[in-house]
Image (tube, helix red, strand yellow):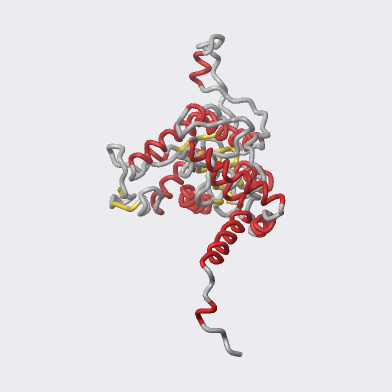
Amino acid sequence: MTLPPAEERVVPARAAILTIVVALLLGALLNADMLRRTAETQPEGWRRETGLRLVAPLTHTSRMLRFDEPRAAARSALGRPDERAKVVVTFRSTVPAVRSPTELTNHPRATRTAAPRRAPHKPAFSRSRKLRLLAAGDSLGITPGWALYRLAERNGAINPVAPVDGRVATGLARPDVFDWFDHLRRQAKKLRLNAVVLSFGGNDDQSAITGLRSGVRIGSFGSRSWLREYRRRVGGVIDDLTASGVYVVWLGLPVTRDAAQTRRFEVLNRVFSSEALRRPDRAAYVDTSKLLVDPKGRYTDYLPGTDGDLVRVRAEDGVHFDRAGGDLIANHVLAALRTKFVLQRRP
């Protein structure tokens, strides 16, 4: 068969442009929900509003023609959440918030000469009855989590009931990326946990925040409304877990090589520490920002080891931890667990 001359097979420019436009439109319809999610998570302003207006008719048309179903099916097969569903952060716990000692002292009806409290009973765990533990959170919790598991192996009274549940690029601000709220509730029940070590915030130092209740609008990172919502989420996570009998140890965020990032982390650390303080019998806070710094409180890659020689404690990126840094944090986590539990060493 003889092909026609090359000049007869040239596609007209108009047809080529039309083909490109149709392909782009088809791609937009197939991925309309992803485009909507992207627009929703933009900072407040004209760009976000314009994006939402442009995406709205695409989303409506996509669902009317059922173009959203192939992407939803693919995400379901990969175990990812359905982008079509609106995630709203709610909590099941009805445990009342615990006032801090300062709040109680300053309360008009509080007495400053209250009778001394009896030392709380500490549940005891041993080699025959082990404490069921899980380490979970963003990427900053992975290295300390595995370090804690190594300590648990040596101690013998702690049973890490599942691998470290570390998920990169996740947090409490974006449940549309990964819904930690629902996941932790299910894990606490499924694994019958006694304690959990949480690490969040490394990806939450941003204005974008999803999972809001209807009618709620949030300002930029660090604003009063942003902090109010983020504090609700931190306290809600703790209350939901502790209502199931799980003791929570919350890891603070470290000093990083980037001074601006460190300042943002300090904002989040104030939320973590204060929410743990409000629940002194149910949660503890480990301040990593005080652990991996030089004598002047500044970022450092190296610290003296047990033998006095310098060891690397931070990863190359200036944010995450090297193994020795994880070991240092894990020892403080174990100390926090010992304030709540008796952990009998292996003979």
Q: Residue at x 46, y 40 (%)?
A: 206
Locate residue 32 relative to residue 318 in the image: left or right.
right
Locate residue 311 relative to residue 190 in the image: left or right.
left
Height in image: 61 above or below 120?
below
Please state which of residues 206 and 311 is positioned toward the viewer in this rendering: 206
Q: Residue 288: where, in percent of width, then height?
A: 41, 40
Please state which of residues 139 and 325 is positioned toward the viewer in this rendering: 139
Please state which of residues 256 and 193 is positioned toward the viewer in this rendering: 256
* Residue farthest toward the bottom in the current orientation of the protein: 1
Q: Residue 287: where, in percent of width, then height?
A: 43, 37
Locate residue 288 relative to residue 94 in the image: left or right.
left
Q: Residue at x 63, y 45 (%)?
A: 57
Height in image: 17 above or below 125?
below
Q: Residue 46: where, in percent of width, then height?
A: 49, 37
Q: Residue 125: where, in percent of width, then height?
A: 60, 43
**Is any atom of residue 249 visible in this view?**
no
Q: Quadrant of the N terminus?
A: bottom right
Q: Residue at x 60, y 40 (%)?
A: 124
Q: Residue at x 35, y 49 (%)?
A: 318
Please state which of residues 266 and 153 is positioned toward the viewer in this rendering: 266
Locate residue 262 relative to residue 284 in the image: left or right.
left
**Is any atom of residue 65 visible in this view?**
yes
